Amino acid sequence: MTKNKHETDNDLSSKLVNTYIRLLELQPLTPLAELRPFIGKGIYAIYYTGTFPAYKSITGKNIPIYVGRTMYKGYYRKDDSQKSKSIYSRLIQHANRIKNTTDLKIDCFGCKYVILDGSWPEACHDELIIKYKPIWNIKIRGFSHRDPGTRRRDSLPEWDTIHPRCNKAKF
């Protein structure tokens, strides 16, 4: 069967997404507590290296506990890419959330990130979730400060129940 000249090559898109994911995996692990400001939007992953019993299955393995993404306002707007610190800002928000718990230590967390343009962050994020099934994305909801439905709930998100806050500051 011949290919319709109007069809896109989805296999090529899939290969590019997998290339970006491989690039993320090859990045050095930066301790979350030592993160320095940088510019860019894209994808990131947070890794856990501590001894919390619920995370024993991923400790010491190259499996992220959480993956996230930041995107441009439109597929190819690069005009704000020279000044946006959105991955850095998001990682700092996550670090502050971790620091504000009674049972986690920020020194047990590291991160990796890749700066990407266009719609690639969303495609890569979805694929990372499928590939790794990160605990804080899939099993324990509520880590992200952008957790859908948090304003409609009367109770604390599951993440806050497992990892109580030192104070009740909102993130």
Image (cartoon, grey):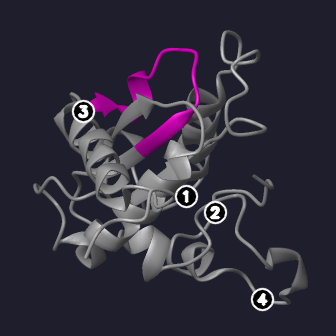
Contact check, label 3 and label 4, Cβ < 8 Å: no
Dot 3 corresponds to which residue?
29
Q: Where does residue 38 sit, x and y in percent of width and height?
A: 53, 14
Dot 1 corresponds to which residue?
101
Mark whose residue sits in front, 1 or 3: 3
Is the residue 103 above or below the residue 47 in the image? Answer: below
Highlighted range, magenta: 30-44
Left or right of 38 in this view: 5: left
Q: Amino acid at mark 1?
A: Thr
Q: Quarter of the image holding residue 78?
A: top right
Q: Within 10 Å of the Cα at label 4, are there few (<14), some (14-19), or many (20+) other Cα atoms?
A: few
For marks 3 and 4, the one nearer the N-term is 3
Dot 4 corresponds to which residue?
155
Q: Amino acid at mark 3?
A: Leu
Q: Secondary structure at mark 4?
A: loop
Q: Where does residue 16 sit, x and y in percent of width and height?
A: 32, 44
Q: Where does residue 159 sit, x and y in percent of width and height?
A: 56, 74
Residue 165 marker: 2
Gap in angstroms between the C-alphas marked 4 and 1:
18 Å
**Number of on-image labels:** 4
Q: Which residue does the image show at 85% across and 90% down from the upper left?
A: 154
Gap in angstroms between the C-alphas marked 3 and 4:
35 Å
For marks 4 and 1, the one nearer the N-term is 1
Gap in angstroms between the C-alphas marked 2 and 1:
4 Å
Which residue is more in the foreground, 58 or 78? Answer: 78
Gap in angstroms between the C-alphas marked 1 and 3:
22 Å
Q: Secondary structure at mark 1?
A: loop
